[in-house]
Image (cartoon, helix red, strand yellow):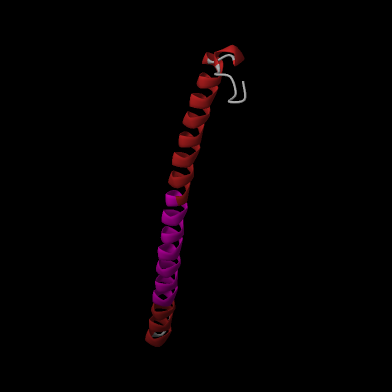
Amino acid sequence: MTSPSSTEDRIADLEVQLAHHAHIIDELHEMVKKQWAEIDKLTRTATFLADRLHTVEDGARKTSPGDEPPPPHY
């Protein structure tokens, strides 16, 4: 059978490990939150750029070189 001080030492060690793990989990949680915020920002930017590209492509298809007004020197 283990002595009371040995049990208390083991419990104290477990409490230290638990506190350390809780701290690491908090740090990881903050890191994941920042990463998701960055992913959301990049997703919104990519969507915006894709929409703009489609708009430009659609505009380019609708106009032919003959539809453009002549340059000012004519």
Can I make out residue 1 in this image?
A: no
Q: Where, quadrant-wise, is the C terminus in this rendering?
A: top right
Residue drawn 46% across and 36% down? 48
Confirm whether residue 28 shows in the render.
yes
Q: In this view, does 8 lie above or below 63?
A: below
Q: Where is residue 42 in the image (x, y as percent from the top left)?
A: 49, 44
Q: Is residue 62 or residue 30 the one in the foreground?
A: 62
Residue at the extreme bottom: 5
Q: Is residue 34 above or below residue 17?
A: above
Q: Position of residue 72 (x, y in %)?
A: 58, 25
Q: Nearer the viewer, residue 7 or 50?
A: 50
Image quadrant in which you'd find residue 65: top right
Region rendered in magenta: 14-37
**Magenta stretch secondary structure, dominant:** helix
Q: Is residue 24 magenta?
A: yes
Q: In this rendered view, identify the residue nearer to me: 26 or 56.
A: 56
The percent coordinates of residue 27 (x first, y second) are 44, 65
